[in-house]
Structure formats: C-alpha cells, structure tokens
Amino acid sequence: MARRPKGWHRETIKAELRKRVGPITHLSEAWGFHRSAITNCLASARYSQPLELRIAEALKVPPCVLWPSRWDRSGNPLPRVVGQNDNAGAVAKSRQNGAAA
C-alpha cells in the first residue's frame, strides 16, 4: 500500500514562523486575518489556501514541501473535499449494521 506523502508537522511550521517573524498571532493580524487564523489553517486541511500560500512565502518554502498532500510541485492546490465528514464512512457502516439487526 502506498504511503501518503508527509510534509512538515504543524508544530514545526509554527516554530519556524516564530523564529523568523515573531508571534504568529501578530503575523495573522498583520496579514489581515483573525489572530488564530494561522493555527486554524495548520490544524485543518480545509481551512484557507491563500493563507497556506502566505505561510509558505514567509518560510521561503514551496507549499508542496510543507503540505505535499494539499499542493502539487507546480504550486497548484490539489482537489479538496469541502464539507465532508471524516466519520461519514463509520456512520454509514453503523447504519447498515443497525438496519440489519
């Protein structure tokens, strides 16, 4: 089975941002976002592609290196399913089991 490509860990990204530009809450606000926007962006793959690009630019690293499962090598975002429940498969299976019982 093929392994999913791994990028940087979100805590590593936050630490590098802190080293290079200072508190990430100040950076979020300086970019015109809510103070927790960077943290939210790093926690969720469905958050904000423009903010991911800003983070990659601030770190001087291509977004495909930070998030290989979200960006291709040419800098284009990969398709993301928005609004999909991660537990949808488990919920559907439990419904099937309940209906059969």
Image (cartoon, rainbow, N blue to C red):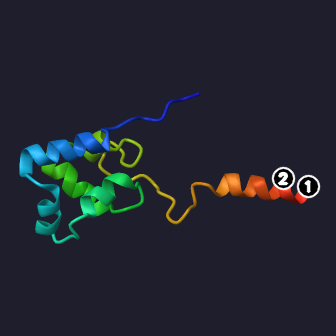
- Please tell me which residue lies in front, 14 or 66: 14
Tell me which corner region of the image, top left, top right, bottom left or bottom right, holds residue 11: top left
Q: Is residue 60 visible?
A: no
Looking at numbered disc 2 in the image, what kind of residue is underneath it?
Answer: Asn
Quadrant housing the N terminus: top right
Task: State the residue at coordinates (20%, 66%).
Answer: 35
Task: List x then y, in percent, for residue 100.
Answer: 91, 55
Looking at the image, is 5 positioned above or below residue 84? Answer: above
- Tell me which corner region of the image, top left, top right, bottom left or bottom right, holds residue 45: bottom left
The disc placed on residue 97 is: 2
Question: Looking at this rendering, what residue extends furthest in the right direction?
Answer: 101
Where residue 8 appears, x then y in whole percent? 30, 38
| Image: 36 above or below 75 | below
| Quarter occupied by the C terminus | bottom right
Q: Camera-side residue: 64 or 91?
A: 91
Taking the spot 65% from the left edge, 57% from the top edge, the residue there is 88
Q: Is residue 72 left or right of residue 38?
A: right
Q: Which residue is mark 1?
A: 100
Image position, residue 74 (x, y; %): 30, 46
